[in-house]
Amino acid sequence: MPDLPDLVAQASRGDQNAVESLIAAHLPALRAFVRVKAGALLLERESCSDLAQSVCRDLLENLDRYQWQGDAEFRRWLFTTAMRKIADRYEHWGAKRRRADKVVPVDDEGVLEGFAAIYTPSQHAIAREELKRVEDAMTSLTPEKQDVILMAKLMGLSHAEIAAQLGKSEGAVRTMLSRALAELSDRL
């Protein structure tokens, strides 16, 4: 399998296999990121899978203009695009013309349905409960703690990269991440 810079270059030239590899490599982390950052209000109206797919579409539409600057920068671009998409969708649903009583809640079964063939019904229920438990624990953390966990564990940023983004020292980031993970662990 080609490395990330080669995949980005191939995908920007329209190579469908490279596009599929790029999406497959980042989709699990992107979905998890979207589920945490979108919040309950948005996820009642749109599925996590639809939001993640929309982010991927935006990335692919602009991939030809992307200049490779390293793995961390690519992930930053991916998750920044996701945050913009979430903000856009909140704006969409917040518009005065959207009536809350006309909204049909979305059941995000797509996250687990893909595994239906290998899960028994009880395993499916357990997996759904575990996903809900992790989401509830993450959303109970302060936004700063959520962000440091997402940056370290989903975005794959180093302590130095997180420190630069948050305007903190590496030592402060290590401490903050350690405390955030400990609190998350306690809540789980």
Image (cartoon, rainbow, N blue to C red):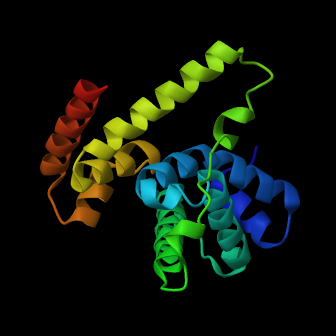
Note whether 17 is above or below 129 in the view shown. Answer: below
Q: Is residue 81 visible?
A: no
**Tally of marks:** 0
Q: Is residue 79 visible?
A: yes
Residue at the limit of the structure toward the bottom, as seen here: 96
Give x and y (percent) for residue 186.
Answer: 23, 25
Q: Residue at 49%, 68% (x, y): give it.
A: 86
If the image is split into quadrants, where does the N terminus sit? top right
Give x and y (percent) for residue 135.
Answer: 41, 39
Q: Residue at 52%, 65% (x, y): give it.
A: 82
Q: Residue at 68%, 78% (x, y): give it.
A: 62
Q: Is residue 171 left or right of residue 140?
A: left
Note whether 56 is above or below 99 in the view shown. Answer: above
Note whether 138 is above or below 122 in the view shown. Answer: below
> To which quarter of the image does residue 5 belong?
bottom right
Q: Residue at 46%, 64% (x, y): give it.
A: 76
Q: Is residue 175 left or right of residue 96?
A: left
If the image is split into quadrants, where does the C terminus sit? top left
> To which quarter of the image does residue 10 belong?
bottom right
Give x and y (percent) for residue 17.
Answer: 85, 54
Give x and y (percent) for residue 182.
Answer: 21, 30
Q: Is residue 153 left or right of residue 127?
A: left
Q: Nearer the viewer, residue 39 or 77?
A: 39
